[in-house]
Image: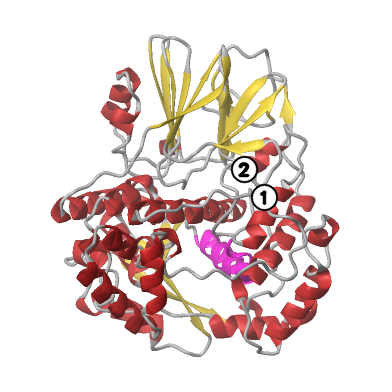
């Protein structure tokens, strides 16, 4: 596999002493430095100057040149940039010499900072910045991840000394002190029609700025990926890829993909064989990422798919990731109904959701009365028996606000999904997850509860917003293909390899007890009832540590960086 430079960007505070920049970086600005690393599409790295003021938009973004010029001149950067679709970071150097970095609302483009003797440094990769802080894993963050990856230590990163910039905040750097953060985004309410219009604009533009003018592919499976694929077909040819078991050419996702007949769309099946089973050793070594990637267990499948598409000329691959989090969320609104005293609606909705899940409504009602929207309908697996390290206190979302619960959940998943983009980068393909875009989150969370939550309809807001685009059978579809059986088979087939992961780097760090973890793996392989998420997190973390160990890390140099415009 070709050695590819990781794609990321970063910069320094003004007034810093002459300091190192990443080796091979392309310098966009001097004093203070702003750089990009890796191979970027030209339209995803845009800069503009006006006098001593400068602005850069990094990543796929719907802003026009006129929009960028406005953002360069307005007093408050977010007043203009908050409406831009896509997944990007906006950086502005003001005439007073202050650096402003706008972190997107959805955490799809995460940012981090690190303190160095030469002043603070910020960047879009915690892994890259970690080499400035000793390159040590933050075992506290990792312990919280192993306890529950959906409730991580939000004020820490996977790397000691590297701190996250809160999503939806403005990072400000000046010559007089350390970094400061100001919240620029908060949910706002819209009418049902306005919310749907905002969603259509945000998702449509988010797709366009990724695929327009390039060869693109997409997942083609459930309603989320189908919607994205049909939007992409409006801006040029798109190849929709549907994975399916080898020899099975009808039914499931294949049935729905075959039913689509849209101009610009080419349907391509991707048959799965034994070499694609979860936990199988892949032909391509797992690349190092900021944190453990969600798809680590299925890397053999994902890497083969990505390599195949890149070899066919694809520049960008779109997924439907994030759609479930936005449109198939837990019934968190029950807490809001209980708090407002809307008892009839609360009891009725709880009964409907319980019937859908084939369970008693009592747990849902009890959780609603306790008023913690984030925990309604969410399983708490408890502390795994094999977790050996203490878990730091984690700030959790509480209260009856369903919007806050939705935003918190989406940001956690989006930040984690960024590691998937890094995996694809290593194989020469830009991965696009438009459902994680900040403008999409802004549109969805602005919708009234009735428009978003339903136990009687599948993803009502998405289906209604794109009713003219989705065929009837896709809008009425209530599920998509699952791979639960593949995980059982993959674990049985690769049991020896997986057992080897149970007594490795995590154990050496004192984070896991090998014997209880091995017992859990054995039981799962034999078909015993197993709580999969904690076990998968442990195996992903072990594989991640191994990948990081193989990685050469980011090198920094005081030599002149590559001039702007060079490749």
What residue is drawn where x is 64% and y is 86%? 489
Residue 529 locus on image (x, y percent): 62, 86
* Neighbour tally class for label 2: few under 14, some 14-19, many 20 plus, Cα within 10 Å: some
Disc tally is 2
Is 309 covered by the magenta stretch?
yes
Report the span colored magenta.
294-312
Q: Nearer the viewer, residue 407 or 498?
A: 407
Instruction: Tell me how far mark 1 sits from mark 2, CA to CA.
Output: 11 Å
Q: Is residue 553 magenta?
A: no
Name the residue nearer the viewer: 426 or 527: 527
Residue 557's spot in the image, x, y percent?
Answer: 73, 25
Name the dominant secondary structure of the magenta segment.
Answer: helix
State the residue in front, 463 or 556: 463
Residue 264: horizontal and vertical position, in percent? 29, 64
The N terminus - image quarter = bottom right
> CB of mark 1 within 8 Å of CB of mark 2?
yes
Q: Earlier in the sequence, mark 1 or mark 2?
A: 2
Q: What is the quadrant of residue 54 in the picture?
A: top left
Numbered badge on residue 392: 1
Residue under numbered circle 2: 156
- Regarding mark 1 in the picture, which secondary structure is present there? loop
Q: Residue at x 51, y 42 (%)?
A: 110
Residue at 72%, 29% (x, y): give it: 556
């Amino acid at each position: 596999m070709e050695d590819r430079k990781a794609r990321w960007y970063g910069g320094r505070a003004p007034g810093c002493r002459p300091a190192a920049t990443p080796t091979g970086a392309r310098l966009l600005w001097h004093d203070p430095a702003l750089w990009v690393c890796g191979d970027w599409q030209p339209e995803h790295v845009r800069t503009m100057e006006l006098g001593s003021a400068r602005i850069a938009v990094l990543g796929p973004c719907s802003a026009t040149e006129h929009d960028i010029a406005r953002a360069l001149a307005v007093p408050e950067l977010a007043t203009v940039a908050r409406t831009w679709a896509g997944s990007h970071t906006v950086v502005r150097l003001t005439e007073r010499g202050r650096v402003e970095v706008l972190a997107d609302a959805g955490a799809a483009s995460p940012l981090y900072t690190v303190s160095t003797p030469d002043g603070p440094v910020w960047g879009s990769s915690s892994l890259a910045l970690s080499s400035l802080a000793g390159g040590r894993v933050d075992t506290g963050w990792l312990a919280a991840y192993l306890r529950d990856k959906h409730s991580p230590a939000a004020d820490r990163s996977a790397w000691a000394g590297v701190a996250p910039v809160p999503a939806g905040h403005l990072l400000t750097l000046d010559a007089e002190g350390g970094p400061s953060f100001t919240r620029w985004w908060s949910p706002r309410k819209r009418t049902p029609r306005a919310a749907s219009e905002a969603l259509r604009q945000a998702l449509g533009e988010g797709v366009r700025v990724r695929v327009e003018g390039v060869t693109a592919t997409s997942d083609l499976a459930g309603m989320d990926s189908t919607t994205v694929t049909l939007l992409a077909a409006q801006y040029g040819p798109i190849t929709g890829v549907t994975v399916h078991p080898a020899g099975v050419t009808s039914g499931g996702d294949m049935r729905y993909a075959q039913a689509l007949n849209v101009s610009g769309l080419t349907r391509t099946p991707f048959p799965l064989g034994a070499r694609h089973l979860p936990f199988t050793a892949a032909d391509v070594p797992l690349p190092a990422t900021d944190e453990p990637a969600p798809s680590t267990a299925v890397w053999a499948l994902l890497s083969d798919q990505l390599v195949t598409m890149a070899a066919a000329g694809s520049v960008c691959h779109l997924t439907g990731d994030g759609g479930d989090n936005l449109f198939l969320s837990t019934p968190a609104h029950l807490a809001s109904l209980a708090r407002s005293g809307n008892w009839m609606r609360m009891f009725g909705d709880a009964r409907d959701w319980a019937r859908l899940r084939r369970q008693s409504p009592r747990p849902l009602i009890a959780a609603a009365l306790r008023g913690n929207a984030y925990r309604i309908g969410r399983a708490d697996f408890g502390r795994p028996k094999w977790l050996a390290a203490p878990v730091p206190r984690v700030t959790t979302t509480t209260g009856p606000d369903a919007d806050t619960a939705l935003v918190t959940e989406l940001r956690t998943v989006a930040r984690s999904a960024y590691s998937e983009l890094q995996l694809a980068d290593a194989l020469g393909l830009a991965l696009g997850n438009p459902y994680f875009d900040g403008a999409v989150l802004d549109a969805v969370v602005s919708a009234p509860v009735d428009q978003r939550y339903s136990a009687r309809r599948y993803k009502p807001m998405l289906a209604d917003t794109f009713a003219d685009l989705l065929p009837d059978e896709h809008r009425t579809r209530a599920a998509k293909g699952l791979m639960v059986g593949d995980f059982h088979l993959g674990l049985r087939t690769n049991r020896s390899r997986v057992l080897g992961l149970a007594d490795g780097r995590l154990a050496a760090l004192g984070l896991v007890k090998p014997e209880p973890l091995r017992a859990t793996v054995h039981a799962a392989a034999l078909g015993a009832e197993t709580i999969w998420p904690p076990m998968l997190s442990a195996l992903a973390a072990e594989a991640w540590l191994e990948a990081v160990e193989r990685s050469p890390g980011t090198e920094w140099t005081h030599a002149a960086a590559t001039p702007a415009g060079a490749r």
